[in-house]
Image (cartoon, grey):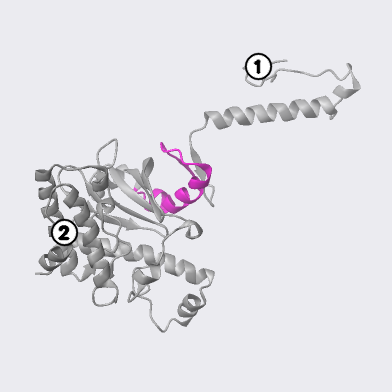
Amino acid sequence: MPDDNSDDDDLSFVYDPELDDDYAPGGPFERFHDTRVQAKVAKRKAQAMPVLAEDDENVLFETIYKPSRHEATWLYSSLKPFFDDQKLIDDIFFQVKGGKEASVYCCHVHPDAQEALGGERVAAKVYRPRQFRNLRNDAMYRQGRAVLTDDGRAAKATDTRLMRALGKKTEFGAQVQHSSWLLYEYTTLQKLFAAGCAVPEPYAVAENAILMGFVGDETRAAATLIEIVLPKAEATKVFGQLKESLRVLVGMGMVHGDLSAYNVLYDGERPTIIDLPQVVRFDQNENAEAIFLRDLTRLCDYFQRCGVSCDPESLARELRS
């Protein structure tokens, strides 16, 4: 009898009902044979098929990137609007990074959208399912913020159903909070990019994902500053460029909220600030000053290691001057 790895799948076998009662139609051998054949055909099919994910409407996506079974469930459903509805992307190349709150993927732009999106690659930030997110103290960052609705507008206090759901922390209320957090990052990116701050250009937003400019080349994303140690002369240049973006941020009354060498990309030309869902405003959040100084301390720690003279409090005064 061939083993399970044999190319002979016994597909041509024909049983003879005259040989033994066990071989009678519906008997043990037929049932065993049919089950074995079905299992081996299914195995071959699974090995030959590309990575596919099925959404609620039985629409299949074929992608170069091969997510795990668990990851695929939320990844494809989150990106479906960009694949199907808006036709902005048509493939996923690779995962840029996975995080406690979201994962970022490099995607191929649909040919019809490449002119509008400025190239063949974009980044998709896909938020993790709420039950698996691990963001501590998010209430500190939400202080003073309006709750944003699906169209990015502030929810009205007169919307009693929404306010009641938020107050009682129902499933609907949790979804509203989740959507508002994501939309806040998207609208913040829009404002900062338009003002000249070096952040990824935002292109589109869906219920669980943001499509934005990709910083990197064909094979990989740009490194974060924490991954590299810059020579002093180059670090001084990068620090100067970064201060220009921070002046824009501070000039608009905003604090990044989680700024450090982990959240600055560098492609060899200029630094790009990323991950902005935790942005707070000086005039709305009582913790803003402390968060601002913490951000600058983390940033100065990196540049000091590169030999650049940097003091958080002096930097804070300079950015506000």
Amino acid type, label 1: Asp
Which residue does the image show at 27% across and 53% down from the upper left? 263
Residue 103 point in image, percent of width and height: 39, 50
Q: Residue 15 lies in what quarter of the image?
A: top right
Which residue does the image show at 79% across and 29% down from the upper left? 31
Quick one: label 1 or label 2, which is nearer the N terminus? 1
Is 258 placed left or right of 127 in the picture? left
Q: Residue 220 lies in what quarter of the image?
A: top left
Identify the residue under disc 1.
8
Residue 211 at least partly seen: yes
Is 279 placed left or right of 170 in the picture? left
Amino acid type, label 2: Ser
Residue 122 point in image, percent of width and height: 30, 47
Identify the residue under disc 2.
245
Q: Under tag 2, what secondary structure?
A: helix
- State which quarter of the image contains the N terminus: top right
What residue span does the magenta drawing correspond to? 59-88
Is 67 placed left or right of 18 in the picture? left
Q: Under tag 1, what secondary structure?
A: loop
Front residue of 11 and 5: 5
Residue 255 at least partly seen: no
Label 1 neighbourhood size at 10 Å, few (<14), some (14-19), many (20+)?
Answer: few
Which residue does the image show at 53% across and 69% down from the upper left? 171
Please check the rendered image and state whether residue 85 is part of the magenta-colored stretch, yes or no.
yes
Using the image, determine if residue 310 lies above or below residue 305. below
